[in-house]
Image (spheres, coloured by chain):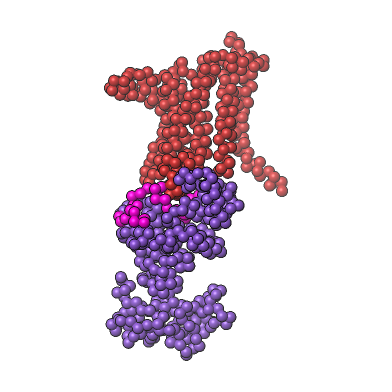
Chain colours: A red, B purple
Amino acid sequence: MNRSVATPWLLVAPGALLFTGLVLVPLVLTVVLSFLAYDHTTGIQDEWTVAHYVHVLTDGYYLAIFWRTLRLAALTTLICALIGAPEAYILSRMGKPWRSIFLLVIIGPLLVSVVVRAFGWSMLLGSTGLVNAALQAIGLGPVRLLYTETAIVIALVHVMLPFMVIPVWTALQKLDPMVEAAAWTLGASRFTALRRVVMPQVAMGLLSGSLIVFGLSASAFAIPGLLGGRRLKMAATLVYDEYMHELNWPLGAAIAILVLVANLVIMLAYNRAVEARARRTLG
Amino acid sequence: MGFLTLEGVSKVYGGVPVVRDVNLAVAKGEFVSLLGPSGCGKTTTLQMIAGLVEPSGGRIRLDGRDITQEKPNRRGLGIVFQSYALFPHMTVAENVSFGLEMRNVPRAERDKRVAEMLGLVHLADMADRYPRQLSGGQRQRVAIARALVITPPVLLLDEPLSNLDAKLREEMQFELRRIQRRVGTTTIMVTHDQAEALSISDRVVVMEGGRMTQIDAPYRLYEQPATPFISTFVGKMNRIAGVWRDGTVTVGNAILESAPADIAPGTAVTALIRPEKLRLCRPGEGRLAGQVASRFFLGGHWLLTVATEAGEIMVSVPNTGEEPAREGEPVGIDWTPATLRVETASEVAA
Ligand SMILES: Nc1ncnc2c1ncn2[C@@H]1O[C@H](COP(=O)(O)OP(=O)(O)O)[C@@H](O)[C@H]1O
Ligand SMILES: [Mg+2]
């Protein structure tokens, strides 16, 4: 009797401890830190204040960076969806050996560090890089690519694509291929069958893919850091700079918390909107 | 000249022939079954008719028009898939309505025809349910309604009843035939169940290893199977190897009287007789003596295996209320010579 009551608690204990130690405690400490006063000469004070939040939310410099973060993350998500969904569809319709090979090609880049890939892109996109050389050869260049938002989005899409392809592919795997064939035999063109029959089925996969890509893009650090340069900051690089260069930890903490809350709100709202529609039909 | 004809149709997958030189002419309004064991190419044949699989050779004609190269959405055939392939995110009514929408049928008429069709398959009160909320039999009827509502010239059914339990399956066979008679649609049904094929088709096509080996009405198919395979695949059959001598089949010391046949004496032959054509009688009577080796009660009849000089022979005894001989008891077996068919070895090879 006693034992059976304790069992579930014992079973969740390792996970709960890990979660508490690695997520909850640092998060609470960050929240506490964000409300502590800071002085440039003496450092962190023992007083409570909301000044950091007010400062961040009223300063155009920070708001511009937040807006850029939101914009680039949304754009990355959109491009990933536009490329990833067809990619997953083609993948799911491939024959025996090719499917595994191309799945590996898609997942493969995950095995390489983001930093290495960001450096790779900076070499490709640099003023003497391959892309500019090619553009010059056909008389279109040189174009400034490195340290622009374009560079950040290109690299983010490259890194995030597997996170879109895999959930959509999983959703497609669950779909009976004969369902699409049934639509054709009822008179639907390939496009109509895709739009009316396949798309609604993979909506949930597309939703989870979008959430993952948006969340990871909005908090990306290495890519904006290396491809955006010193001036084009995004949320994560901004927090880093507050901590490491300005040494204003409370302000950095406030920014981090704001980004976290904004991210949460956007993702929850998006999830609810799409899921409500999907649940009505998919259950 | 058939309404739907297959002329020398074949399909090769990676060098392996799956369907070989299939010729078939289906008349308008006919109900034809494709019967064969799993993997013999039935689904492939059906999907070639539907346009979902491209034939490697041959022509398919519908009402005289060559449709071999036509896209599936242009053929306008109704198909019920083995898995039903209903649209999971659409209600029953939306599923049935889909084909009409694709044909730009106006809303009001669409609703009317969907309601009519759902009435025909007894699903009028399920219109707003989703497929996942339906039982197997109901899903199957939705699939049939969805295929029939577009009034297709030909209805193709791929093992539509194989997922159902025995009772429901029997009901649905009846139902399927009823709907087909009502609507009069030319129908081709794939099945691996010989009883199902015999009970609801006008004609049965037997497929073996990608070939059509017999095309006949159910009764003829049962009484005159064209190949040894069909003789045992469709119903039960005693096959007794022997030698043709003086108008009988001789097996060791046993002499089996048969229908007259034009065979040279001394030829190796196989005697064929169905268990239900044999009669059990008292020991010492009948044409062959033996001993009951096993006995199974099957409700409507008993199936006995009798050990005789000609080998073990299955005998079906109708359940008339009298219990037949038990295991180990001696019995006699009798038959009408005309019901014992003889097959020569050369026929077997053909
Ligand atoms: N897409 C395919 N690629 C390769 N072989 C296939 C394909 N589809 C079916 N086959 C093979 O063709 C044969 C016949 O299949 P099928 O027509 O589905 O048989 P049935 O419906 O009679 O069970 C099987 O041996 C199967 O393995
Ligand atoms: Mg099949």
Tell me which residue sits at (52%, 55%) in the image.
B140
Left or right: where does residue B242 sit relative to residue A114? Answer: left
Task: Check the image and name the residue furthest to the top.
Answer: A41
Residue A139 location in percent, x, y? 29, 20
The one of A256 and B86 positioned closer to us in this rendering: B86
Residue B208's x, y, as percent?
37, 64
Nearest to the observer: residue A208 or residue B28: B28
Q: Does residue A233 appear left or right of residue B262 in this picture?
A: right
The image shows residue A42, relative to residue B283, as above or below, that is above
> Percent position (x, y) of residue A160?
46, 31
Task: Note whether residue B203 is visible.
Answer: yes
Q: Is residue B187 magenta?
A: no
State the image coordinates of residue A194 (x, y, percent, origin top left): 45, 41
Residue B86 vertical placement versus B241 (above, below): above
- If the image is split into quadrants, where does the C terminus of chain B sit? bottom left
Q: Residue furthest right?
A: A1
Height in image: B160 above or below A109?
A: below
Q: Please give left or right for residue A44 compared with residue B156 in the image.
A: right
Total number of numbered labels? 0
Quadrant including the N terminus of chain B: bottom left
Q: Residue furthest bottom?
A: B284
Residue A253 visible, this orientation: no
Q: In which image quadrant can residue B243 be found?
A: bottom left
Q: Magenta segment range?
A: B57-86
Looking at the image, which is closer to me, B247 or A132?
B247
Residue drawn at (54%, 17%) of the image: A63
Residue visible at 43% across and 72% down? Answer: B219
- The residue under the point 45% across, 48% down is A186
